Image: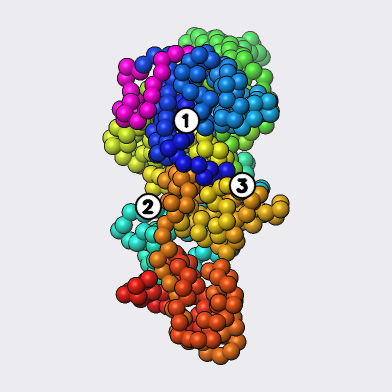
Amino acid sequence: MASSSSPELDQFLVCGLGSLGQHCVVALKEFGVRVVAIDLSYPTDWELSQVPDLLDQFILGDFREPNVLKSAEVHGCRAVLLTASSQQVNVEAAFATRVLNPKARLVVRSNQKNLNQFLAQELGNFIAFEPRQLPSTAFTLAAMGNEVVGLFHLDNQPVRVINQLITKEHRWCGQRFLHELDTRYRRVLLYASAGQESGGAFYTWQSDTLLQAGDRVVYVELGDHISNESKRKKPNYLQQRWQRFYEDLTSKALFKQLQQWWQSSSQTQVQKVALFCFLTIVFALALGTILFRIYYPKSTFYETFLMTAMLLLGGYSDVYYSSFEPNKLPWWLHLFGLLLTLSGTAFIGVLYALLTEWLISSRFQFGVPRPPVPTKDHTVLVGYGQLGNRVAELLREFRQTFVVIPLNNEVSAGALPGVAVITGNFSQAMPKANLATAKSVVIVTDNEMLNLEIALMVRRINTKAHLVIRTYQQRLSEQLSRVLANSQVLCAFALAAEAFAGAAFGEKILSLFRVQQQTILVTEYRIEAADTLCGLSIAAAAYGYGVVPICHTRHEVCKLMPSEEIILEEGDRLVVLAKVDGLRRIEQGRPNLANKCWFIRVESATNESARFEGANTLARITNCNLGQARDLMLNLPRTLPVPLYWQQASRLVRELGRVQVTAKVITKDKTKTIH
């Protein structure tokens, strides 16, 4: 619901001034509302230095206590944001708040899905988020480093956001105007010509711009959510194994792998002893075959090889007292045969020890084997907590090649089937991930300093890999972004705070993603009679408030990429893509609608049929009276006295041209004419 109340009368209460709470204060003040905060102690080190100046009031105390909530005038608050790190504290405060204010919007930090559902039923006007999981899509898309920058679902229909660089080979280059990209399945969000930064507000481009090489277009479209890059045929497990074996077959690759294996601190003493014994046995087998061939020239190499192997397996007496004539052999060859038997016995003991260790470490998990660690152009996901788990699921949906390093977190045998997993501590796992050839590395552990350490280590190994780093402090995020090139440092709380703030106004935040360092919120509105959206056309809502409508539902009939001419009515559902500024303008209402300052001057129509169709087109797009439109078409040339937004007016000129009516766009004072 978009409220039509005055923002000066709205008060919002933030309980808990940790990192998330401070970011929520900043996000709420973007809406121009009164913000009060409660915490047990006054923060000595503000993560966001501007927060103390933004707060209208700060209260020391336990926000679970009714007296403390009363001192914050919770009874007059429109929404209460409970952002403490303790879920129990937040739930207790939610009950205390509901007793004092039965209508306040409760936005709670919690990851207990079942509990949240019960609380929503009992408390009403309640929504819960887990800030560590909410930005998972943003982390996943940042890791991919390709054109797909946003992905979400509407009524089981995948919707994706594409950041497309136009190259000379692209099918749109020199062939399409910007307005031609807007179809029933696609909407343009942002545009930048070659050499310019794309960004800013929506709808700031000229619709008659012809796309050229170097231009960049950000658009939202319906369709399959798999990126073009991932549509290439993916080899199956056996193909992956054979390709890996073929690539590792060269002597250079074998030597390099052996060197890495020996130097890696992950190898236990038993494994190193096993390798030493194996090399010793191979050398002894070759030497014994040659020596016995020399002293038994009538024997073949095959026979002497079998003799030596038998000695290694403990058959000393069988060889010397059944096959050979011992008196013809020198004493040192007898001693050599004895050493072969002892060496073979020792090797078998080491082999048993290695097999036992492997069986114990594998925990008898004989399920479907995991694929090998990718060798190149893959994503390395470090950390498998709540956020890492969700990122892994999304990478699988995108059919990306990746390997997971859960570090000390346990991954069960059934988790992530078909995904390469490297277990062990930090020093054991990282050298196995082929970091030097990785496409991107996503670091999402719960330890901020560990994330920094891993990022710096990766940068030393691979300067080209795209780094995606999870942080909790905005200050650290900004500093890392300046220092680490080709990296994207995402503050989880900063991303989540915008969703918390949007939800505080009663809106449902379905998803969020990042485009050109800007956060775009996928927001759902339920239109009510007193809303600032009720009675507006979709075109007026889009161009007036600066949002992009992508879904409209009326009487359970859903239309994706809806027509601009639809008038929003009570009971409708509208889903838009919006920045915080757009949500704030909708919240503050009609005074914040952009002004309509363009008009249509109709010059001529080729025939009566064109006049008839032209009148219908005018009435449909401008929502003017059909009789007024027909009267205008009978007395050309004339100007339609209905103000329009530029995008509406330019579209109307194109639509009229299709029915053989000539028109142009003019300003109100007619001093500027746009054909």
Which type of secondary structure does the marked residue at label 2 adopt?
Answer: loop
Q: Which percent across, then down, holds residue 51? A: 34, 28
Q: Please report the residue visible at 52 percent of the width from the left and 78 percent of the height from the top.
A: 656
Which amino acid lies under the numbered mark 3 shown in the image of this protein? Glu
Q: Position of residue 281 (x, y in %)?
A: 51, 19
Q: Height in image: 494 above or below 99?
A: below
User: Mark 2: few, some, or many residues within 10 Å (few <14, many ≥20)?
Assistant: some
Q: For residue 577: magenta?
A: no
Question: Which residues are drawn in magenta?
Answer: 43-62
Q: Give the Cα distance between marks 2 and 1.
A: 30 Å
Disc 3 marks which residue?
528
Q: Residues within 10 Å of mark 1 (few under 14, many from 20)?
A: many
Q: In which quarter of the image is the N terminus?
A: top right
Question: Picture quarter containing residue 454?
Answer: top left
Helix, strand or loop at disc 1?
Answer: strand
In this view, the mark in front (2 or 1): 1
- Towards the viewer: 333 or 556: 556
| The label number, if any, that marks residue 12 in the structure image | 1
Label 3 near label 1: C-beta < 8 Å?
A: no
- Is the residue under label 3 in contact with that under label 2 (CB below 8 Å)? no
Residue 309's place in the image compared with 222, above or below, is: above
Q: Kindly indicate whether the residue at mark 1 contacts the one at mark 2 (C-beta within 8 angstroms).
A: no
The residue sitting at 48% across, 44% down in the picture is 587
Report the disc number at residue 199: 2
Residue 137, image x and y in percent? 52, 40
Q: Answer with the quarter of the image where residue 472 lies.
A: top left
Query: Alpha carbon of mark 2 to alpha carbon of mark 3: how far?
Result: 32 Å
